[in-house]
């Protein structure tokens, strides 16, 4: 597929382990004929995620006198580097000369849109999680930033129905809002439903994700404890937690308190290839997402797409974009945020009824193929670009 589009993607980081989705879109756009470049401030995983051209624009240090001046003047530390960064980014983007700029996450879109406007280049703002949409509102400074961004941007992409609705609530013009689910490379996720590998005794649950408040690992452990009581001696229920983060000590302490050390394994961070392997060795995918105390939320949750692609039934919460992926009673079960009793009962029910797995597995894989295939989603993204350009 050939086209003449020249698009620059801008993100603070490229490409962190937790931000596979940006790398996947950039490389798939290139595969589909778009001339893609990336502007960033920090480059990660250059060996495992090779891509060129990537342009690194250094940010002023936190204690740079000019940045300190702007921090005092603006009264907002997050935006204190913007004036200097805008000048440097304008020079670099003018040199690259793209037809369109695609920004990732709310702060970078708010920071860059005046640069795009000054260069007369259309800008697409991509909102990947709910926290970046709403956690700083109401706040007069950020309300002004959102108003300016919504007026300036050519398109506002939300990865979930929930995020698109939030953009509308904040005053974004409906005609600029685009729903674009995150996609995965299906070739990396062979359909491997858990039914055939079930030995009739041990049911393995899996959680993949950072140990942070919005992914609620403590609620998951409490739900797992309920599930263990629910199944009794009929099933040997186990849980593997893949991921690390600020709540690691709390997680380990609760495992000990609930006397689950023999049933719960914490692996810490694992490479993505290992995640795929863990899914192929598990029977159920379990994660309890909820809104954090600071308003941060999960986005669409790409791991749920990956789990469904491999054929895992999912037990999780009605949170942000997750219901776009997990269909209650069809590909898994959804419970209310914080309802550990209900989640535990749902985990226990599926552990005791493996005959329910095949239907969930087949429907989950079909939904991923139809709605979350990276190749198809990238074609939709290119259509958005073409409409704008």
Image (cartoon, grey):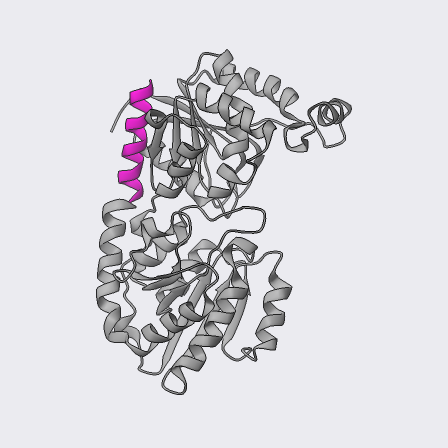
- Is residue 185 visible in the rendered image? The answer is yes
Residue segment shown in magenta: 373-389
Residue 197: x percent and y percent?
A: 29, 74
The answer to if 387 sits in the magenta stretch is: yes
Q: Is residue 245 above or below residue 83?
A: below
Residue 353 sits in quarter: bottom left
Residue 20 horizontal side relative to residue 90, left or right: left
- Locate the N terminus by quadrant: top left
What residue is at 25 percent from the left and 73 percent from the top?
A: 196
| Residue 296 place in picture, x, y as percent | 53, 46
Coordinates of residue 96 in the picture (x, y in percent): 48, 18
The residue drawn where x is 29% and y is 50% is: 187
Residue 309 screen position, x and y as percent? 30, 56
Q: Viewer-proximal residue, 365 or 70?
A: 70
Residue appearing at x 49%, y 35% in the figure: 105
Q: Is residue 203 left or right of residue 92?
A: left
| Residue 33 visible somewhere in the drawing | no
Above or below 280: residue 292: above
**Quadrant in the picture for residue 12:** top right
Q: Quadrant of residue 331?
A: bottom left
Residue 249 versus residue 132 in the image, above or below: below
Task: Tell me the chief SS of the magenta region.
Answer: helix
Of residues 348 and 376, the one drawn nearer to the viewer in this rendering: 348
């Amino acid at each position: 597929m050939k086209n003449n589009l020249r698009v620059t993607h801008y993100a603070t980081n490229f490409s962190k382990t937790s931000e596979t989705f940006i790398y996947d879109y950039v490389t798939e756009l290139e595969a589909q004929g778009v001339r893609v470049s990336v502007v960033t401030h920090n480059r990660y995983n250059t060996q495992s995620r090779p891509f060129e051209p990537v342009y690194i624009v250094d940010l002023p240090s936190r204690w740079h006198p000019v940045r300190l001046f702007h921090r005092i003047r603006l009264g907002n530390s997050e935006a204190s580097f913007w004036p200097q960064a805008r000048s440097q980014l304008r020079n670099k983007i003018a040199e690259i000369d793209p037809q369109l700029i695609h920004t990732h996450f709310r702060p970078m879109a708010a920071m860059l849109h005046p640069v795009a406007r000054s260069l007369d280049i259309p800008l697409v703002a991509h909102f990947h999680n709910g926290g970046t949409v709403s956690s700083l509102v109401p706040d007069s400074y950020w309300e002004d930033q959102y108003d300016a961004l919504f007026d300036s941007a050519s398109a506002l992409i939300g990865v979930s129905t929930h995020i698109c609705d939030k953009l509308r609530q904040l005053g974004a013009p409906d005609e600029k809002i685009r729903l674009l689910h995150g996609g995965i490379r299906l070739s990396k996720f062979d359909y491997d439903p858990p039914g055939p590998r079930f030995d009739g005794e041990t049911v393995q649950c899996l959680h993949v994700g950072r140990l942070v408040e919005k992914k609620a690992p403590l609620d998951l452990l409490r739900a797992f404890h309920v599930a263990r009581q629910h199944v009794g001696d009929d099933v040997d229920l186990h849980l593997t937690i893949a991921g690390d983060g600020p709540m690691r000590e709390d997680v380990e302490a609760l495992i000990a308190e609930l006397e689950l050390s023999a049933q719960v394994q914490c692996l810490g961070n694992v490479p993505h290839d290992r995640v795929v392997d863990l899914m192929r060795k598990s029977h159920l995918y379990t994660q309890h997402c909820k809104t954090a105390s600071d308003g941060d939320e999960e986005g669409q949750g790409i791991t749920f797409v990956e789990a469904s692609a491999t054929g895992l039934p999912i037990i999780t919460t009605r949170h942000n974009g997750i219901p776009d992926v997990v269909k209650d009673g069809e590909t898994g079960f959804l419970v209310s945020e914080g309802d550990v009793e209900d989640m535990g009962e749902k985990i226990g029910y599926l552990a005791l009824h493996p005959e329910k797995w095949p239907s969930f597995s087949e429907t989950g894989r079909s939904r991923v193929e139809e709605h979350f295939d990276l190749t198809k989603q990238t074609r939709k993204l290119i259509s958005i670009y073409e409409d704008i350009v």
